[in-house]
Image (tube, rainbow, N blue to C red):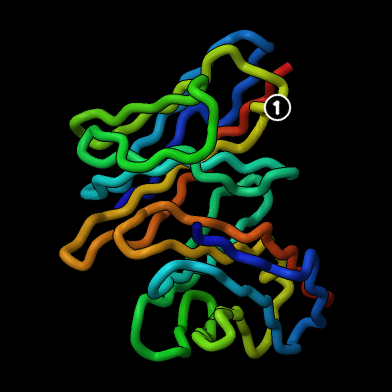
Amino acid sequence: KAGVTQTPRYLIKTRGQQVTLSCSPISGHRSVSWYQQTPGQGLQFLFEYFSETQRNKGNFPGRFSGRQFSNSRSEMNVSTLELGDSALYLCASSPISSAGYETQYFGPGTRLLVL
Amino acid sequence: AQSVAQPEDQVNVAEGNPLTVKCTYSVSGNPYLFWYVQYPNRGLQFLLKYITGDNLVKGSYGFEAEFNKSQTSFHLKKPSALVSDSALYFCAVREKGNNRLAFGKGNQVVVIP
């Protein structure tokens, strides 16, 4: 199976702009989670989507939003970019079994630089 | 809220020696524990997990981890380290019924030839 794919891989934006990142999960995986990785804060959970519904949200401002489509692909959007939004944004997908959530598998990430 | 502590910033080990990366956790109820590895400019690669069962879990690339409930620890081990094991290692925990992973700060492992 193909792994989790994320596009674009690299992005440069300026303060005040908005950005949309895309994630395609592993085939058959219906849960998609997003994480932000920075040197200072480490890996932080942004949100999780399952069946086009946001099921869980981390402690990030409302400028960070996401959505999931019927084919389980997901996008996240950051509006009014700030310098501190520069980070590696990681998407992870996982299947759902009768036992509950399974292992999350990560994509290569999108590296966002805000100037 | 769930949390993970990885007390060491960097672990240096000579090639061929045993490698241990420490992790302690805090969670309500039974923990779901994971180890991931990250190479430069890459995403996270899954190594192994503990859900239930044997306290010693075997994973990819010769890694294993030992779950200790009384010490709330889940240390990662490899009997004989390789130079190619040099990378950033993350321990993560989640609660049952919740797909939100809480990560430790990560440990940089440097294997010296």
A69 left or right of B64?
left
Q: Quadrant of the C terminus of chain B?
A: bottom right
Residue drawn at the location 43% of the way across and 62% of the way down: B94
Residue A99 image offset from top left, x and y in percent = 21, 67
Q: Which residue is mark 1?
A: A84
**Residue located farthest toward the top when viewing the structure as drawn:** A16
Q: Is residue B2 left or right of residue B108?
A: left
The residue lying at 77 percent from left, 82 percent from top is B15
Q: Position of residue A57 (x, y in %)?
A: 42, 39
- Which residue sits at x=41%, y=54%? A105
Q: For residue B104, which quarter of the picture?
A: bottom right
Amino acid type, mark 1: Gly
The one nearer the camera, B100 or A38, is B100
Left or right of B108 on screen, residue A23? left
Name the residue nearer the viewer: B92 or A93. Answer: B92
| x then y, percent, for residue B92 | 53, 63
Characterize the local packing of mark 1: few (<14), some (14-19) or many (20 or more) Cα atoms within 10 angstroms.
Answer: few
Q: Secondary structure at mark 1?
A: helix
Q: Is residue B44 above or below residue B67?
A: above
| Horizontal side, residue A5 vs residue A28: left or right | right
Point out residue B25 in the picture as x, y percentages from the top left corner.
56, 71
In the rendered image, the vertical position of residue B8 relative to residue A73, given as above or below: below
Residue farthest to the left, as pictured: A98
- Residue at image position (50%, 44%) is A45
